[in-house]
Amino acid sequence: MTSEGQPAVETWSDGRPHAGRVFAAVFPHADDLTIFASGTALKLLHEGYTGYLILTTDDDKDSYDLSSAETALRNDEESRRVADLLGLTKLYRFDYQNHHLGASELIELRHRLITLFRYLRVDTVIGYDPWGHYEENPDHVITAQAVEAACWMAGRRRDLPELADLGLEPLTVRDKYYVARGPQLTNLVVDISPAADRKRAALALHRTPLDNMWRTHLDLHPGDDIGYDEFVATRVLDDAGGDYGFAHVELFHRIGAGA
């Protein structure tokens, strides 16, 4: 936040000012990164970051009428194509069952993230805001809590001390780009206009979950005859930046470096 109380703004830099830095985008579901932060991921990659995507669930519930197995397979295939399109170095899948994340998985999930954060030497995370309001999806809540705790605990020598014997030395992740589906504390606006076309191309690859969103919307609103393409453009891709002076933006609760 600026001294005037307005969100800070990030635009695209020339050159590679962040060469050598690493980000990990950690989300529960295949399309979360693409919808909320893929433009920012592309910006960071353009500026020299190496990027990784960590998906915590198998996403086996996110289709309209497919079996769980077919749903998980399609979302896996689609998310891998998206990772390639965005230029991410690797996709890690934890494959916890979709919508079954809860307190019993929190500690194990946190420890797995600590291990990867140390191994990848992560500087920056992108994920859901653990303080986001009115979030009803347990996968979002638990993943966000695990990420926030792992960022801190990865830097503590007495947490998982055996990792040092594997060469994974402590590392604190201080830089965080957090998003929320509901009311959000926004202290950073990222201009993603140069990446808008690639974001749309990535979104088009997520046909399975977006088809589910669209068809479920029609079930809940029987008088609405909105087509698939219009639904995605107007109800899912909410990145218009006119209020901030840009064509397309993504909004964040930024913690740490640069906030």
Image: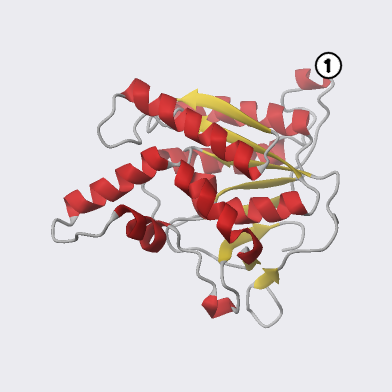
> What is the tally of numbered marks visible in this picture?
1
Q: Which residue is mark 1?
A: 165
Q: Is residue 51 left or right of residue 142?
A: right
Secondary structure category for the residue under label 1: helix
* Position in image of residue 155 (x %, y %): 77, 37
Q: Quadrant of the C terminus?
A: bottom right
From where the camera sits, is residue 39 visible?
A: yes
Label 1: how many residues lie within 10 Å, few (<14), some (14-19) or many (20+)?
few
Q: What residue lies at 36% left-to-right and 60% top-to-bottom?
A: 235
* Position in image of residue 175 (x %, y %): 72, 51
* Front-most of residues 245 and 254: 245
From where the camera sits, is residue 97 visible?
A: no
Name the outermost residue toward the bottom. 4
Q: What residue lies at 52% left-to-right and 31% top-to-bottom?
A: 56
Name the outermost residue toward the left. 223
**Colour logic:** secondary structure
Placement of 124 over or under 69, stated as above or below: below
Q: What residue lies at 81% left-to-right and 25% top-to-bottom?
A: 168
Question: Quadrant of residue 26 in the image?
Answer: top right
* Position in image of residue 50 (x %, y %): 76, 41
Q: Quadrant of the N terminus?
A: bottom right
* Front-most of residues 196 and 251: 196
Placement of 249 over or under 42, stated as above or below: below
* Front-most of residues 249 and 108: 249
Q: What residue lies at 57% left-to-right and 57% top-to-bottom?
A: 197
Amino acid at dot 1: Asp
Question: Quadrant of residue 64 in the image?
Answer: top left
Placement of 94 over or under 78, stated as above or below: above
* Position in image of residue 166 (x %, y %): 81, 17
